[in-house]
Image: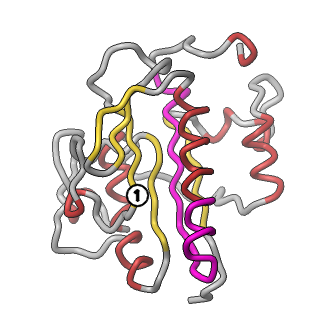
Amino acid sequence: MNPNLDFLFVFSDQQRYSALGANGNSVVQTPTIDQLAAEGMVCDRMFSNHPLCSPYRAMLLTGRYGWQNHVIDNEYLPRRDIPTLPGTLHEYGYGTAHVGTFHLGEGPYQKEDRYGIEYLAAPDLHRKGGYFDPAYFENEIGPTERKGWGPKIETDLAINFMERHLDKRPDDPFALFLSWRPPHWPYGQYPDEHR
């Protein structure tokens, strides 16, 4: 592995391929994702063979089908005896983080519940209130309420992770998974400037 190669994976939940300006949609406005697509790498020949929250995330984590990693619906957790992408990257000196919807267990998240992720900031999905003023678990701490709109908070948490990582380990690469929940329901919960 190239020790100077950082990874930033950005996902939005339940947003289909055709619902992005970068993919030719002239109605849906996605300027930030369009800019990321223009300046980064787009994997447009990939698909989820099980596009449901937990199974999809477990496939990203393990690189295995749900029947192999044991996550066949939203009620199961991945097997702990198979390698994970964050765990493997961590073994090669990467700082690893996941910020946003995780849905592979419930917080607080002890080390063994993070599957090789050093820093996990996941919203408490059982809390009422939608995308405004969500509460987050950060590893073993939480839930802690944060004021504001969830995707903006998650972006700030991701930036904070990168800044801390670069400050403490400037010679080590990082791998960060940023998983915004919108446009997943509840619909219409956006700041006025994003309507």
Q: Which quarter shows the N terminus? A: bottom right
Q: Residue at x 78, y 43 (%)?
A: 34
Amino acid type indicated by mark 1: Tyr
Considering only vertical position in the picture, is 77 above or below 88?
above
- Which image quadrant is residue 32 in? top right
Q: Residue at x 54, y 39 (%)?
A: 154
Q: From which residue to which does the magenta span run?
A: 163-185
Q: Residue at x 62, y 83 (%)?
A: 171
Q: How many marks?
A: 1
Considering only vertical position in the picture, is 25 above or below 95?
above
Counting from the top left corner in percent of width and height, residue 132 is at 50, 18
Report the side of 33 relative to 58 (left or right): right
- Residue lying at the far front of the rendered structure: 168
- Which image quadrant is residue 79 in? bottom left
Q: Is residue 177 magenta?
A: yes
Report the side of 140 relative to 6 (left or right): left
Q: Residue at x 30, y 45 (%)?
A: 54
Q: Is residue 179 visible?
A: yes
Q: Which residue is mark 1?
A: 119
- Which image quadrant is residue 156 in? top right
Considering only vertical position in the picture, is 132 above or below 20?
above
Q: Is residue 8 magenta?
A: no
Counting from the top left corner in percent of width and height, residue 67 is at 20, 59
Q: Is residue 73 visible?
A: no
Q: Which quarter shows the C terminus? A: top right
